[in-house]
Image (tube, coloured by chain):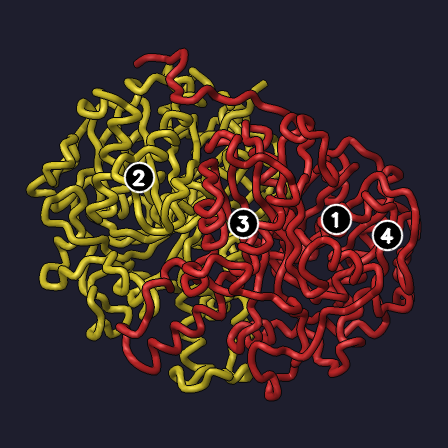
Chain colours: A red, B yellow
Amino acid sequence: MTVSTSTASTPTPSTSTAAPVITGLGIVAPTGIGVEAHWASVLAGKSGIGRIERFDPTNYPVRYAGQVPGFDTEAGVPSRLISQTDHWTHLAFAAGEAALADSGADIDAIPEYEKAVVTSSSSGGTEFGQKEMTALYQHDPTWVGAYQSIAWFYAATTGQLSIRHKMRGPCGVLACEQAGGLDALGQARRLTRKGARLVVTGGTDASLCPYGLSAQLTTGKLSRVPDPERAYLPFDAEASGYLPGEGGAILVLESAEAAAERGTGYGRILGYAAGFDPAPESGRPRVLRRTAEAALRDAGLAPADIDVVFADAAGLAADDRDEAEAITQVFGPRRVPVTAPKTLTGRLYGGGAPLDVATALLSLRHGVVPHTAGVREPAPGLEIDLVTDRPRELPVRHALVLARGHGGFTSALVLGR
Amino acid sequence: MTRRAVITGVGAVAPGGVGREAFWRTLSEGRTATRLISLFDAGAFRSRVAAEVDFDPAAAGLTPRQIRRMDRAAQFAVVSAREAVADSGIELAALAPERVAVSIGSAVGCTMGLEEEYVTLSDSGRKWLVDHEYGVPHLYGYMIPSTLAAEVAWEVGAEGPVALVSTGCTSGLDSIGHAVQLIEEGSADVAVAGATDAPISPITSACFDAIKATTPNNDDPEHASRPFDGDRDGFVLAEGSAVLVIEEREAALARGARIYAEIVGFAGRSNAYHMTGLKPDGREMAEAITVALDQARLDPTAVDYVNAHGSGTKQNDRHETAAFKRSLGEHAYDIPVSSIKSMVGHSLGAIGSIEVAACALALDRQVVPPTANLKTKDPLCDLDYVPVTAREHAMDVVLSVGSGFGGFQTAMLLARPGTAAAAAGRSD
């Protein structure tokens, strides 16, 4: 047995612990396509929630959702790939292109194994899968198309983006429902510490097909309030659940060294932590407080250093109370502005937290905390300083983004300028 | 001090028998668990062969509520996790729950539950606007694969990082690699990690039929999975799960745990070439192997056995044979290389963890599992694939590789505890 000195065909890149930088944002969300459209909608409190258009929702108890306005599949997706991929991946193709262009990185100049793709996906190509299952059960197995095997599975978006942008590094997919987007960013950060120069990360989701909506209805967490303006009101006394949405954000994360060479970037990932709620019958406390504190510790920051919290904002009374209490325990009552711009988009699952991260980065850049549109004030007993009514201007040095996924997945990310 | 990850518990639900020892008997006896599909009527399908698990969830210890709630893939994972924890002897309740992580891999999640419910809600495909009122309460849990990791987390009481890793057919290697990262970086001290898939259902069979990836050899199901054989004609779809207990090495040593293996290298690369196609040069898999060796500070000649992806498609077998030669050089000809998919089939995302479990047991028992059904080698596959019969073999270091849709290539290196290879340490 021989212990080696060096066997690498390519030199092992140096590792780094300096905080990596998000240099590119690609937003394809109900609030708009592109950074400017999204930010304008967020500041104006312009909702992207409307009656579901991808199918006739008349016979469903939930008929509203956040949908990407004016998405042009032919313009956003290479033509050959439109029929090979689900709508969820279509949105990610467009967001990925935009994020890479926005980053200004010279992609071709980066060694092939030092660029990678890590996305979150909550439910895969649900609409594509429903179509193929329809073909199977209405006809026979030969009616199932060749692309079901590559369009429906949860790794489709990462695989397609890796191929499209020739990224041969260690790719990944994390599926942790709404928390998964932060976990993807956490994994992307790990890769930058192990030699990756650039990681395409974030995620999208799009399960607004009849079967996808029907599955979501079984949780009882979707709001059945028929007024789209009043259906998703997290932290409000009228909280009645949430509305789903499609889209999300793809982000470009670069190592500190790579970003420093161009002197660019929206902000840095300073801290990250993940935890999981104990089973409800265990009687043990939920883990959001501990996870947020762990992320702060990881960032080397104290609660007073955080200028805004982007909340998970489930829109269910018990979950909202748990989140408000966790925030209060970490920061003290009403000691930090809290916001949830996702009332404009609905919950986007794998795309939700990446969009929150993008919004938080814009908040850092512009010194403006967007408001939680639609919510008038927090429900009695919730001791949080929820930003309502209009955006609030203040210097934002650091932001904490919280995300929780169905079943107990809990993640927290700290961003800094 | 550098934190290192070791395997201290193994649990498996594999075709051929439920449980770790039944699994090892299948492998060491070279028995094949492939047969005609019994889980559904496959009469209309091109490929009607699969490696199924004879699984009785009640006999495996699941409660009626767990059985009702959980998709078959979740049932496999929870039963495997229980066995792994018992095997490790670790007292999880004595640990801070936030120091316990879960990392589960799956390629297709709860696809059986999702399909069965679709049939009901759509009235056998007749209604595009499906009837949500027919949905079972846990239908959403089928749509999100994260349910599989959540079920394992509830089972073991984990409150640390919990993740579902879904990178297609490398999911089971990547989920274990993810757990190794968590241990090494200090995010957890113990990880319950593995993978599960239960994809033997009409939609999955149909989608592999459509691209002719699975074998049409329905006349001889027991010999249908033929990696590296000149007569092979596609992979055999399978189901199963393996879950491991992975611990920080010092803590495992301190409690006197039995250590199967140390995970000394883990690397992933992507071919950025094609969602299903592989170039014959094996370039990116070779790179993953080389990087894993570098992390382990091992020379290619340190590798004593290669557990191949060996799916039994022509392009795979040639691709990885080239990758082994490219990364290990002439040494590739000197060591055994085998594919357990010849016996337990290809369970998509689960198989990576099942193969790591096989490697841990192979190291422990110093026996190489064979490649069953290998009668006449493909002339382009000219390594020692350990045909038909298991082989006693001295091993300190084993390499396991995976290759999957999306172009993902993963390599993992395990070392026998207490050997020079394990002591060489890890760098990245």
Let me know if marks 3 and 4 both belong to one chain.
yes
Considering every residue shown, the one lying at the far front of the view is A75
Chain designation of label 4: A
Q: Chain of mark 1?
A: A
Same subunit under labels 2 and 1?
no
Circles 2 and 1, Cβ within 8 Å, touching? The answer is no
Between label 3 and label 2, give the one nearer the viewer: 3
Residue A280 point in image, percent of width and height: 66, 60
Q: Is B162 situated above or below A111?
A: below
In whole angstroms, how far apart are the C-alphas of marks 4 and 2?
53 Å
Q: Which residue is mark 4?
A: A369
Left or right of A253 in this view: B39: left
Q: Is residue A283 visible?
A: yes
Task: Using the image, name the chain to which the residue with label 2 belongs.
Answer: B
Task: Say whether marks 1 and 3 touch (CB < 8 Å).
Answer: no
* Residue marked by disc 2: B358
Q: Chain of mark 3?
A: A
Q: Mark 1 highlights which residue? A: A401
The answer for how far apart the CA atoms under marks 1 and 3 are is 18 Å
Cα distance between the residues tagged 3 and 4: 29 Å
The location of residue A154, given as percent across then percent down, is: 47, 56
Q: Earlier in the sequence, mark 1 or mark 3?
A: 3
> Residue drawn 84% across and 56% down?
A370
Q: Amino acid at mark 2?
A: Ala
Query: At 57% across and 61% down in the image, what residue appears?
Result: A205
* Amino acid type, callout 4: Val
Left or right: B120, with A139 as reference point: right
The secondary structure type at the circle numbered 1 is strand
Where residue B372 appears, x then y in whole percent?
15, 44
